Image (spheres, rainbow, N blue to C red):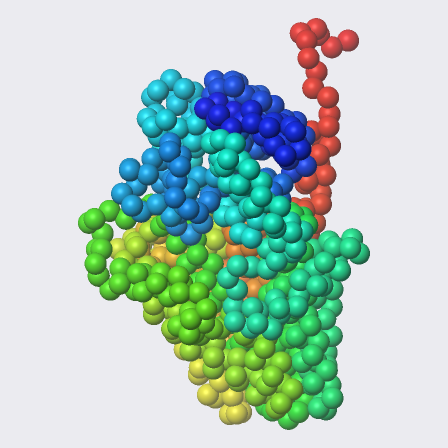
């Protein structure tokens, strides 16, 4: 239930008549209702707003009385998925008494009078914000503090500007919502109101919303080969009543069909698979665009989209691996396993580097943390390139990292022109080069930022530690990253030996007895489980642990003569489990409800080792993989069906009032 509050205090334009005859404040109230507000209230001052915030139970949409905007602007603000509390941010010079903001990575890191930001302002507060339910106490506190004069407001500011500045001073995390294509102005008098209404009339609101469904900054392939025509599909899907999750499911079917065709010999099948893969990627873009166009966002839809992206890609790898093997290439499945492992470890670093950057934006560096070094110069260079939208350097920077659009385009082209083996090799080569490039630059920049990001979350959960790691002694002087890397080296060395001796009779049986040694080396990573993860590079720990577990599982499969497709399937289930963790981190969701019974990377590796030693590596891997898959499915059902339904029933139970004893 969203409450909208029109805060007219200090806004002289609130009572001005609009073209339709109603006052500007009344029109804002009507727009708030169309934006989804279940109730609209007017507040004359900040004390009255604080009282309304005290009793609100859901998000609160606050707007000043001087905002002239398309209704879609308020609807987009009210439904923005970027965070619980979001502020409207405009471009252009600030008016008298208007608060300005400084943004980093979409977060408002500073707000207040223009003179206090020393020329570093990146935008102007747009006079409206949506406050999440969890931040309502902060909203009420900021309103009372500003009203009492304990928080210095911008000079001669309207009430909504003073409120916004007060929220920033109190440290509330606020995300910025920029206005593109649509129109939003803050006005002070009748001439400005007339000009703003004229600007509104010049813009086709629905056409602008359709264009806004496309990401402002996307990758090269998506920008020029998908988004040039995908909005037509978005409009068609909206008219058919399809939801974003439905489109996601259809895109999965396209990817599965493409994978099947890649597994079939013959040029027509490969070309048909390439076409289906491209169309599947188009639909993968359409689901997000449809969500933005219809403002149909949900935690479930975001999670499903993230998980589907990875599952589709790895099913395509499976099809390529099977097809290459059927065509007579000995290492088809091995290449598919390598591509999946590399891509997953890369994604782990991508996720945590993004979290690192977001946390760094909330923790501005002080002068004593190494500013002016190579990390500072790299950061400045990256900012300049990102600002030069459309330039050669901009597109090179976005393409060299091998994003998903470029990966799918490369697969489609190479498999259609050559064969699945060439496609997998191309993916691996570009993936390794991209990993080396991003890894080197991010390491340098992360050392400059020095943000202990893993200490801000449940490190045990995101390390995926099990019972063994939890009970191991802590080796603090070495550091958790060094221990995790050492742990990954043991399985890597054993896997290399196993692959090198693959053609020798009895080599697997002889090396199999080295599995306990590799396991002991892998468990070195558990010695850092209880240590503080506050080093400048400790955000790499989850990726290092993932690499160690995957390499150990592959080594068990190679030495235990497990079929390659079964090794792929087991590692695939592991990736699904780990992507579930990162997707929940990105979507700000709670931990999977059944995570404690997934055994942890240490427990799973121990069970695989025991199965291999007794000669049942294949059976052990199949059994453990099936168990993890069942736990994952059960966890999904619990998290997204059972627990929400239980919570809905609990909230619907009437609360007993009064002091009488039960009869």
215 or 501: which is nearer to us?
Answer: 215
Q: Is residue 452 above or below residue 557?
A: above
Please state if 224 lies on the left or on the right of 165 as rendered.
right
The N terminus, quarter of image: top right
The residue that appears at 62% across and 68% down in the rendered structure is 228
> Where is the C terminus found, in terms of image quarters?
top right
Q: What is the number of callouts on the image?
A: 0
Residue at figure coordinates x 75%, y 58% from the top left = 237
Q: Is residue 212 left or right of residue 238?
A: left
Which residue is painted at 67% across and 75% down in the image?
277
Give the farthest residue toward the right.
240
Question: Residue at horizontal 44%, vertical 83%?
Answer: 497
Q: Residue furthest front?
A: 191
Question: Residue 261 lies in what quarter of the image?
Answer: bottom right
Question: Does the image show residue 656?
Answer: yes
Q: In the depicted view, which residue is nearer to us: 45 or 327?
A: 45
Front in this rendered view, residue 491 or 266: 266
Residue 304 drawn at (x, y percent):
65, 56
Q: Residue 114, relative to residue 226: is it above or below?
A: above
Indicate the position of residue 533 as horizontal and vertical percent values. Answer: 35, 52
Residue 333 in picture, x, y percent from top left: 60, 82
Query: Where does residue 388 sit, x and y in percent of width and height?
Result: 40, 65
Whether residue 16 is situated above or below residue 239 in the rendered picture: above
């Amino acid at each position: 239930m969203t409450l909208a509050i029109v805060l007219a205090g200090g806004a002289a334009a609130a009572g001005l008549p609009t073209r339709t005859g109603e006052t500007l404040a009344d029109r804002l109230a009507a727009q708030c209702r169309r934006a989804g507000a279940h109730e609209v209230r007017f507040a004359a001052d900040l004390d009255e707003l604080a009282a309304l915030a005290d009793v609100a139970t859901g998000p609160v949409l606050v707007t000043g009385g001087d905002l002239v905007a398309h209704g879609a602007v308020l609807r987009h603000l009210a439904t923005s998925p970027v965070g619980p509390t979001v502020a409207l941010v405009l471009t252009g010079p600030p008016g008298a008494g208007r608060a300005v903001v400084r943004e980093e990575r979409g977060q408002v890191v500073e707000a207040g009078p223009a003179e206090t930001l020393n020329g570093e302002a990146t935008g102007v507060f747009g006079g409206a914000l949506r406050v999440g339910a969890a931040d309502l106490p902060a909203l009420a506190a900021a309103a009372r503090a500003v009203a009492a004069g304990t928080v210095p407001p911008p000079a001669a500011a309207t009430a909504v500007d003073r409120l916004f500045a007060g929220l920033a001073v109190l440290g509330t995390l606020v995300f910025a919502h920029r206005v593109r294509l649509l129109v939003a102005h803050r006005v002070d008098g009748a001439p400005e109101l007339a000009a703003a209404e004229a600007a509104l009339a010049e813009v086709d609101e629905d056409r602008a919303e359709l264009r806004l469904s496309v990401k402002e900054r996307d990758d090269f392939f998506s920008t020029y080969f998908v988004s040039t025509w995908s909005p037509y599909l978005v409009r068609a899907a909206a008219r058919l009543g399809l939801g974003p999750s439905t489109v996601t499911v259809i895109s999965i079917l396209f990817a599965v069909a493409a994978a099947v065709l890649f597994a079939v010999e013959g040029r027509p099948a490969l070309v048909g698979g390439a076409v289906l893969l491209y169309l599947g990627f188009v639909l993968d873009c359409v689901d997000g665009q449809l969500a933005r166009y219809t403002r149909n966002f949900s935690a479930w839809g975001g999670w499903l989209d993230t998980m589907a992206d990875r599952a589709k890609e790895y099913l395509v790898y499976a099809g390529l691996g099977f097809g290459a093997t059927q065509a007579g290439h000995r290492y088809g499945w091995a290449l598919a396993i390598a591509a999946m492992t590399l891509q997953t470890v890369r994604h782990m670093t991508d996720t945590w580097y993004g979290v690192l950057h977001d946390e760094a934006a909330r923790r501005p560096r002080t002068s004593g943390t190494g500013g002016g070094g190579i990390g500072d110069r790299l950061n400045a260079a990256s900012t300049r390139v990102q600002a030069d939208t459309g330039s050669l350097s901009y597109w090179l920077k976005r393409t060299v990292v091998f994003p998903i659009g470029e990966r799918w385009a490369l697969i489609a082209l190479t498999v259609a022109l050559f064969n699945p083996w060439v496609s997998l090799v191309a993916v691996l080569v570009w993936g390794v080069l991209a990993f080396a490039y991003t890894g080197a630059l991010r390491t340098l920049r992360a050392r400059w930022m020095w943000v202990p990001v893993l200490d801000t979350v449940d490190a045990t959960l995101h390390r995926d530690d099990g019972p063994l790691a939890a009970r191991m002694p802590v080796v603090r002087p070495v550091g958790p990253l060094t221990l995790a890397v050492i742990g990954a080296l043991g399985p890597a060395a054993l896997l290399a030996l196993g692959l090198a001796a693959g053609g020798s009779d009895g080599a697997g049986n002889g090396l199999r007895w080295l599995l306990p040694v590799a396991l002991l080396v892998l468990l070195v990573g558990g010695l850092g489980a209880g240590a503080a993860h506050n080093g400048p590079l400790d955000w790499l720990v989850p990726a290092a642990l993932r690499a160690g577990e995957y390499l150990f599982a592959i080594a068990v499969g190679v030495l235990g003569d497990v079929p390659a497709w079964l090794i792929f399937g087991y590692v695939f289930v592991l990736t699904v489990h780990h992507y579930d963790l990162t997707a929940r981190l990105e979507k700000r969701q709670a931990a999977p409800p059944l995570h404690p019974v997934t055994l942890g990377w240490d427990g799973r590796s121990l069970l695989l080792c025991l199965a291999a030693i007794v000669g049942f590596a294949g059976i052990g891997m199949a059994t453990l993989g099936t168990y993890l898959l069942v736990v994952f499915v059960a966890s999904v059902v619990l998290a997204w069906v059972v627990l929400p339904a239980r919570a809905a029933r609990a909230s619907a139970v009437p609360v007993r009032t009064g002091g009488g004893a039960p009869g």
